Amino acid sequence: MKTLQFREAICEAMSEEMRRDESIYLMGEEVAEYNGAYKASKGMLDEFGEKRIIDTPIAELGFAGIAVGSTMTGNRPIVEFMTFNFSLVGIDQIINNAAKIRQMSGGQFKCPVVFRGPTASAGQLAATHSQAFESWFANCPGLKVIVPSNPYDAKGLLKSAIRDDDPVIFMESEQMYGDKGEVPEGEYILPIGVADIKRAGSDVTVVSFGKIIKEAYKAADLLEKEGISCEIIDLRTVRPLDINTVLQSVKKTNRLVILEEAWPFGNVSTEITYQIQEKAFDYLDAPIVKINTADTPAPYSPVLLEEWLPNSGDVVKGVKKVLYK
């Protein structure tokens, strides 16, 4: 095993796949000459050249459309959005073309494209640059949505995403690019749509994904000192959703807390809540608790931002609520 930063794991995944398959290319703002806005493509221009590592204008609609069109001529593009907030400019290409082309063509066209970049908040970036879009894209049939929380999962899942014949939304975090973790030396891939039990426990199931799962780990450490055992599940993929792993855990613990960095209305945790109450109602010993951001645009003030974001203290309160403590 070796230790890599999250950004290095992303770079390795893309580079390994590009060496394997010449139809793969990377495009986006500052991915080439600048080595990526977050240095996730560092050194790739030198290795693969300007025809495969392509700097684009600030025109997300344009280069998203170029990527989708190029899949129909045998290419497998990776598109980097500097932030998924900017994907809104190109969302028509993602939703109305990438996600639908296989069905609309009667299976004549595949659309093997990966749209990747950071999602959700990243400090004082204010309301228009701090939005979580996982549930937006997961709402659309035809898209797969991956949100890894560590370098190991990021590399293995990105390689799978690049090999997939359907469009994949791969969501990262500006605040995770420097995170370090162990990654195998050799080739490995991880299956899309399989959650991972990061920490076994017996008293309550805590489900999360992406960078906010760190708050669940902190809460579990605090609760362990009080004799409360948390089972933490990292979804890793929100579409397809591995509800069975969550279901089996809830049947064991009889309680569920869901932590998600997103607005509370109509998000991923809402869907999980519905499916669990539908399939495991008789196993629940308490109502399910959802922990989300405040139902407002993200504030700029660091004091307000701290109140807006869910944290480990909120998780501790949620766990104690379902335990009636």
Image (cartoon, helix red, strand yellow):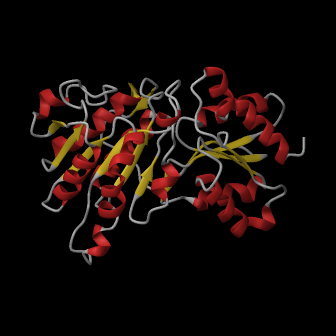
Q: Where residue 244 appears, x then y in whole percent? A: 60, 62
Which residue is at the front of the view, 203 or 28?
A: 28
Using the image, determine if residue 297 lies above or below residue 284.
above
What is the residue that sits farthest to the right in this orientation?
325
Figure disc tally: 0
Q: Picture quarter containing residue 54?
A: top left
Q: Residue at x 19, y 52 (%)?
A: 66
- Residue located at (68% from left, 58% from top): 273
Tell me, yes or no, if residue 194 can be seen here. no
| Front-most of residues 243 and 74 | 74
Q: Residue furthest top?
A: 302
The quadrant in which the C terminus is found is top right
Q: Is residue 250 above or below residue 39?
A: below
- Judge from the rendering whether residue 92 lies leftward or rightward of residue 146; answer left or right: left
Left/right placement of residue 144 relative to residue 250 reads left
> Is 42 left, or right, of 216 in this rendering?
left
Image x and y of residue 235, in percent: 55, 49
Image coords of residue 198 (percent x, y) = 59, 41
Q: Hey, which residue is sitting farthest bottom in the picture?
A: 106
- The x and y percentages for residue 45 are 15, 30
> Residue at 42% across / 27% down in the picture?
177
Residue pictured at 17% horizontal, 62% vertical:
72
Q: Quadrant of the N terminus?
A: top left
Between 248 and 115, the residue placed more toward the observer is 115
Camera sees residue 116: yes
Reply above or below: 45 against 319: above
